[in-house]
Amino acid sequence: MASRFYAAGAESAPKFFFDAQSAGTIFKADASSVYIGHYGAVRKLDLSNNSVTTVAGPAPSLLNTLLGGSHARFTLEGGVRKIGTSVYFGQTPYNGTSTTVLRKWNLDTNQIVTLGGKPDDPGHAPQIDGELATTARFNSINGIAQVGDVVYISDVCSIRKISGTSVSLVVGAYETTWRDSCGTTDGIGTASRLYTGRNYWGNRGVNLMASVGSSLYTLEPNSTCKIRKIDLTDPDQPVVTTLPGGGCGTPRDTLRDPGTATVTQTAVFGDVFPQLETDGTYLYFSEFNTYGHTIRRVDPVTGDITTIAGSPGIAGSTDGIGTAARFNYPSALAVDGGYLYIGDSNGVRRMNVTTLEVTTPFPGSSFPGLPVFAHSGRLYGQTNAALASLIWSADLASGAVSRVSERFSHNSGLVDGQAAVTLDNDNYQSDSYAFGVYSGGFLYAGTSGYSGQVLWKISPDGSRTAAGGIFNSLALVSGSPAEDTSLTYPAGVAIIGSTAYVVSSARHNLRAVNLQTGGLSLVAGTSGTSGSADGTGSGASFKNPTRITSDGTNLYVWDSGNRTIRKVVASSGVVTTILGDAASSTITSLTDGVGSAARFGTVSGLLWVGGKLYVSDSTHSVLREVTFAEDGTATITTIAGQGGTADVVDGTGTDARLYAPGIMTTDGAALYFVDRGKLRRYTIATGQLKTLFGSVDPRYQSLIGNGLLGVARPSGFPVYDPSTHSIYLLGTWGIRVLR
C-alpha cells in the first residue's frame, strides 16, 4: 500500500496519511498557503509569491514537471548493465522521435544523469561519433558491457566504445536506412557486419551484449538467432566470429560424441527473450515461447549451448534441480553472486548456477516484474507495462519489496536528478480498494487487486494485516471444506463491535469476519445463489448486494440486483425488505415514497447517520434521505439535486445539482462524497451542498492558471477518521488522506 505518516508544517505537527501513487491531493489550505501531496511528498505552495517547497517526503515528479525541480524520471530500457556501483542504460523518450540517450544511475548517490545523445532529434535517429556530452548520437541502445576500463555500447548494426569522453565505432557499420548496414559477415572491425537490432520500448531491461574476459558477446534473437563473439585482445583490431550452431527453429542443444568430442548436433534457438547475461564464466539466456520455457547456458570457449533448467515446451511452476524444474515464459535475467534471478509469469525465480537448483523466492502475481540487476543485497527490476513502468527493489534476505520510482509515462520527457526515495511497501503496486470503513482507531478496507480479495486492517503507522479474506477465489481460510468461507468480490463492509460484516456481490451473501480471529461465518444469504426472499440466515437471499451500513444493531444493505434496501438484524440474521420491490427491479425511475412504492436507479452510497439512512443515487444525480416511523416503516425522500439533471452546482436542497455522487462518509454533521472529480459536502442540518475541491475540468489531473496550482481530480471514495478529522480517499491507486 506504500503508505506513511509525514508531518507537514509546524502547526501542532499535523500528520498526513497517503499513498505514494497519490497525485495532487490537497492536505490543507488556508489564506496564505496550500499543502499539496503527490508521490510520497508534501509540498507547500506559498500564495503570496507562488513559491513551492517540499516539506516532507521526496520531491514529486508531476510538480517538478509543472513547477520545476530535480526529481529524476527514468525507465530502465535498452542495454541495462551494472558496472561497479553505477547502472548504465539507454532510454528513448517517445516524444515523436526515435533517438536514444545514454543515462547513468549512481547507486551510491542515487543520482540519475544523462551522459549523451539528444532526445529531441526528429525523424530517423542518426548514429554520430564525437564528444559524448555534445556531439554523439545513438539510434537504439540495445546492449552495454565493459571490457577492461572501456564501456562498449551495442547500437543498431554496430558496436561503439566510449573512450574518455568520446564515442566511436569499433565493429559493424551505421545504418542510413532501415537495417541497410546489418549483416552476418565475420571479420575485423568495421569490415564485419552485425545484426544487432532496434530495441523496441516494450522490452524492459533488454541487454543483448555481455562480456567474458577480453571478449564481447552479442545475442541476435529472432533475426539470425546467432551469438557473435568480438575478441578485443587487440582493442584496435577487434575480431568478429560467429559461435557454432544457432539459427531459428525448434530449440535444441549442442551434442558431442562422447568418445571423440566432435559436434554431432548444433544448437538451434527458438523465441529467445532479448537479454544475454553472464556470471563471468558462462553466458545465459531464456527461451520464452511455447517451445521453450527453459534457461540455456552458453560455453564461450566451445560455443556449446545447453538447456540447464526447465523442459522444452513444458510450462509450469515446479521448483527443482535443473531440467526437473519448470518455468512459464521465463524472461529477464539478473545475476547476483552465484545465483541467476529469472522473471517468470509465476513470479521471480532463483537458480543456483552451480547446483542448478531452482527456487521461487518471490512467488505469484504479487511480483509481476522483470529483474534487471542486483546490488548490495537487493534485487532491482521493473514492471513490463506497455505505457508506463514502475521500478522496484527487493531485499534478498527478507523478501520485502519497495518502490524505487513512480510509474513513468514515455511521453513525459526525461529529467535528471535524484531518484525517488525508496518507500516501504508490502506490495510494490498499490491495491485497488473497493470499500472501507473507519472503526476503533483502524481503517478497514477491502481489496480485489494485486493482493487478492482481502479485508485489510490498516494501522495508523500505515502497516496492514489481513483481517479476513482470501488470496484467490478458491481458497478457504477457515471453517470446514463444505462451508463457503471466501470473500469472493467483496463489495462493502460495516463494523459492529469486533465483527466486520461484508457483502459479496458475486456470492450473493453477507458474511461476518471476527476481527480478533479472522474467522468467517455466514450471516445471511445462500452462497452462489441469488434471490430476493426475506427470511433468516440462509433462508434469505440476495442478488448482487454492493453497499452496507449499520446503526450499531442492524445492518442495511443495498441489494443492487433487486433494487431494494434490506434490513438485517446482525445478531439473528433476520432479513426484511424495507424499500423497493424486487418484482419491479427492471424499473429504474426516481420514485420517493413508503416501503415497496420506492424506486431506485443505481445506489452508489448507503450511510446511517443520526437515526436516518442516506442514499446517493448516481443514476438520477440526487441524494436521498430515509426516515423511519415507530413501527419501522421506511419512507424515502429526495433532499438534494434534481432527478435527471446531471451537473455540479452548489446550493441548498433540490436547488443544488449533482452529477454522479459516489460512496459517502460522515463526520456526524455532514455527508462527504466524490462527484465527477470533486470532493463535495452536504450539511445535514442546513441542506447546503458545497464543493470543497477538485479540478475545474475533470478530464485534467492538474492545471496551472492565474498563478495558482489547480488540485488534482480526486477519485475513489471517502472514509472519515474522527480521531484526526481526516478523510481517507480509497480507490484504484491506494489511499490518500485529506485534512
Image: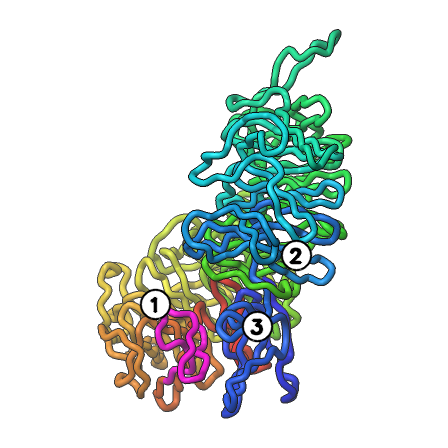
Q: Looking at the image, is mark 1 or mark 3 nearer the viewer? A: 3
Image quadrant for the N terminus? bottom right
Q: Quadrant of residue 680?
A: bottom left
Residue designated by label 2: 105
Residue 737 to residue 138: above or below: below
Residue 651 percent across, percent down from the top left? 31, 87
Give the magenta-colored segment's residue range.
Answer: 690-712
- Under mark 3, the amino acid is Gly
Q: Are marks 1 and 3 in contact (CB under 8 Å)?
A: no
Q: Using a 10 Å C-alpha cutoff, classify the residue at mark 3 as few (fewer than 14 neighbours), some (14 to 19) or many (20 or more).
A: some
Compared with residue 667, is residue 365 higher up or lower down, i.e. above or below? above
Left or right side of 190 for 354:
right
Instruction: Indicate whether residue 694 is drawn in magenta.
Output: yes
Pointer 1 or 3: first along the chain: 3
Q: Can you identify the residue that label 1 sits on?
A: 603
Above or below, 290 against 614 in this view is: above
Choose the circle earlier in sequence order: 2 or 1: 2
Separation of marks 2 and 3 at Cα, in angstroms: 18 Å
Q: Amino acid at mark 2?
A: Trp
Q: Residue at x 62, y 48 (%)?
A: 167
Q: Is residue 605 above or below residue 329?
A: below
Task: Work out how far the residue at label 2 is from the one at label 1, CA to CA, in angstroms.
Answer: 50 Å
Q: For numbered disc 3, what is the local secondary structure?
A: loop
Q: Nearer the viewer, residue 193 or 412?
A: 193
Q: Is residue 84 magenta?
A: no
Q: Is residue 1 visible?
A: yes
Name the residue tied to disc 3.
69
Q: Residue 85 in the image: state x and y as whole percent.
A: 74, 53
In front: 188, or 458? 188
